[in-house]
Image (cartoon, grey):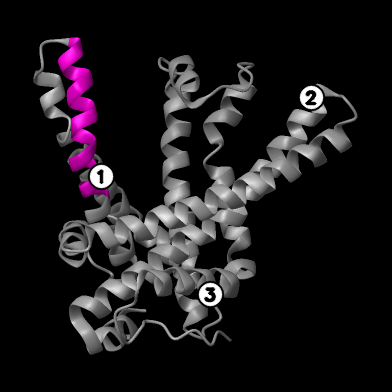
Amino acid sequence: MSNIAYPPQRPLSVGEILDLSFRIYRATLLRCLLLATLGVLAGQLTYVYGLARGRGLQGFVQSIQGGAHDPVFWLAYLLAIVLSLVLYAAVLLRQRAVIGGNRGDGEVAAAVRRTPAMLALLALMVLTGAACFVPVLLSSSMAGRAGLVLLLLIPLSYVLIALSCAFTVLLLEQAGPVASYVRSWRLTYGSFWRLSLVYLVAVIVLLALTGVLGVVSAFIAGLFGHGDVVLVAATAGVIIIAISALTTPFYTAVALAVYGDLVARKEGTDLEQRISATA
């Protein structure tokens, strides 16, 4: 049983948010590892399909170009999105259950029930992000478009921060997609720079961890590959999936910590009662 006090009873500093994220991650990693691994594998469906069609290993853009006129590719692509959403949502829900002292069962079923709402919310978020670049489409010159893209990264960053809690709200509060979208804006209002720092430090930590694990993985792949290029590539692929599975629960742990801080900051002492009623 976890001894993590969640949700926090007071607003947290940046360091305290990150500390809470690490404590959630450590307390829930083993319970979430299978779900995280399945989520990572689900995201590879288009690459698996490309290999089955003899296209070899390709990057994201190349795989999109190669399957542009293949309806089965787009079906695999949509299925990868849906399954990834469901499994990553299940990771977050299981983490919330475990740190609340529960066993953590039924999260996949709960995530499946929320899939239509998650897809609708994802569409709202994509449309909002795309709206930031409407001026680029209206520009007549290529040079002007390039400058606008760089300039519009600023409002896009604000939008990403403003909507960073939307999925957490949808899952923990059982809110609808529009309500989750609006509530995320309200929760994050006035916290742009603080949240930017939280996410920046979290990304730096993940990059450092991934880099260390990547170096170790490359050594292991070369050691067991014995110079066989195919075997080295296969070993490296397995290790990359393992690294992604190990880091995925940290993303959701950060999401939980940030959400808990924002609600405590905005709404105070009624946090425990409202989340407990919907958990």
Give percent across and percent down for residue 95: 49, 71
Distance, label 1 to label 3, CA atoms, is 28 Å
Distance, label 1 to label 2, CA atoms, is 40 Å
Q: Earlier in the sequence, mark 3 or mark 2?
A: 3
Which residue in the structure is indicated by mark 2? Answer: 230
Identify the amino acid type marked 2: Val
Which residue in the structure is indicated by mark 3? Answer: 23
Q: Please tell me which residue is depicted at 11% across the width and 26% down the height of the picture.
A: 135
Is residue 229 found left or right of 250 in the rendered image?
right
Q: Relative to the observer, which residue lies in front, 42 or 182?
A: 182
Give percent across and percent down for residue 219: 80, 39
Q: Is residue 181 visible?
A: yes
Mark 1 and 3 residues: CB-CB less than 8 Å, in contact? Answer: no
Mark 3 and 2 residues: CB-CB less than 8 Å, in contact? Answer: no
Report helix, strand or loop for mark 2: helix
Is residue 129 found left or right of 58 in the rendered image?
left
Q: Is residue 175 above or below residue 6?
A: above
Which residue in the structure is indicated by mark 1? Answer: 157
Residue 159 is covered by the magenta coloring: yes
Report helix, strand or loop for mark 3: helix
Give percent across and percent down for residue 160: 27, 48
Identify the amino acid type marked 3: Arg
Residue 56 disc label: none
Q: The magenta stretch spans which residues? A: 142-160
Q: Earlier in the sequence, mark 1 or mark 2?
A: 1
Foreground label between 3 and 2: 3
Identify the amino acid type marked 1: Ser
Is residue 263 found left or right of 39 in the rendered image?
left
Q: Is residue 106 visible?
A: no
Is residue 141 found left or right of 23 in the rendered image?
left
